[in-house]
Image (tube, grey):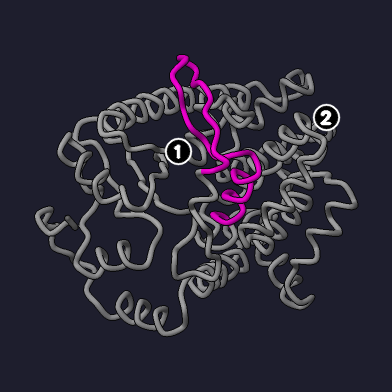
Amino acid sequence: MNLLNEFLHDPPIVRQWDVERWNRFLPLARNARLLGRCLYLFEQHELLDCVPGRIVDQLRGALAQTRYVQIQALREFRQVKRKLDREAIPLIALKGLAYVAASLPPAHWRGLSDIDLLVPEPDIGRTERLLMRFGWIPSGTFDSYDQHYYRDWMHEVPPLRHHVRGVEVDLHHNLAPPVSRIRIDADLLWGRSIEQSDPSGQPVRILGPADMLLHNAVHLFMNDELRGGLRDVVDFRDLFEHFLHQDPEFEQQLMVRARDLGCGRPLYYAVSSAQRLAGLHPSAGFLDQVERDAPPYPVARLMAWLIEQGLSPPRLGLRRSALADRLLFVRSHWVRMPPGMLLRHLLHKGFKSQKKPPVNTADLPG
C-alpha cells in the first residue's frame, strides 16, 4: 500500500510524515486526480496545520481549476438538455456529471474530462443528429471501422464536442456494451431513475442510488481498462457511505439490484478494491453476499495484485505497474467482446494504418 492509500484509510497519519514522505505523496495524489479530495480530507480532519504550505497551495489551485471545469460541464449539460427537451428526448446524467449536478459527495472535489449522458436506445441516432445540427461535431476522426465498432458493438456513439466550447459529450444508450459478458436491461435503469435539482435549481435526472454504484463498478472493472483508476474507487467509497447513511437498508438493496442487473462480479471487484485501497468498511453480512460472486481464488488473487499495481503502486513508473496496466487492458477487451470479435478487432488495430480520413457526416445513420 502506498502513502496515498495509507492517507485515505487513516488521514491523521500525515501528522507523522516527514519532508520525504510529503514529496512522495504529492505526485501520487496528482496522478490519481485526487488533489481536491485530499484537500477536503485535510480540512475535514483539521489537518491543515501539519501540511506543508506549498502543498496546500497546490491543492487549492487544483480545486479552483476543478470548480471551473464543473461550471463548464454544467453549462454544457444545460445546453444539451435544452435541445433535447424541445424534442421530448429524455436523458440521464451519468458519472461525474451526475455527482456534480445532484450535489452528491464527490461534487466537493470531483473533476470531469467530459460529460456522460444516457438516452433511450431508439433515440440515440436522433439525439446525435440533433446535436450535430446545433454545433456539436465529432471529437476525432472515425473511419468506417470505428463507426461500425461504436454503432454495432458498443453502448455509445462516437464522442462529440461543441465546435466553440470544446467540452466533450459522450452519448450512451446503456452502461455496458451489448456484446459484452454483462448484459444490462436499460429499461430497468430508466424505471429506477430519479429527478433532482442541480445547483441552479434546474431539474436533472440521475440513476437510482444502487444503479449509480453499479455503473461505477461496471465502468471501472469490466469495460474501461481501469481508466478512472483510484479516483473512481474513492467515488465508490464516498457514494456507498453516503447512501448507506441515508438508508440503513442500502447494502441489501444494492445486492438485490446487482443480482437483477447481472452485475455481481463487478460489484465484488468494486467493494473489495474500495476496502483495500480507500478504506471502505461494509458490514460483514454484506461482504458475505458480495463474495459469492467472486471468481475462483487464483483469479481473485491475481486480479487483486493487478488492481493494486495498476491503481495503487508504491511509486510511479514501476515496470510491474506497466505490466499490470497492460494485462488489465487485455482483460477489459476479453470481457467486453466474444473471442472472434476480439480477434478481428485486435487484428484491425494492430495492422491497419492509424491515419484515418475525416468522417462523412452524411453517412451517419438515419
Check residue 257 for magenta coloring.
no
Q: Which residue in the protein does label 2 denote?
A: 15
Image x and y of residue 74, in percent: 41, 26
Q: Nearer the viewer, mark 1 or mark 2?
A: 1
Tally of marks: 2
Q: Residue lying furthest right in this view?
A: 284
Helix, strand or loop status at disc 1: strand
Inter-mark Cα distance, 1 to 2: 42 Å
Q: Is residue 43 left or right of residue 359?
A: right
Part of the protein shown in magenta: 191-220
3 vs 168, left or right, is: right
Mark sitting on residue 92: 1
Task: Tell me the number on the disc at residue 31.
Answer: none
Q: Residue drawn at (54%, 27%), measured in percent from left and top?
A: 102
Residue 19, position in %: x, y? 73, 35
Which badge, 1 or 2, is on the more N-terminal residue? Answer: 2
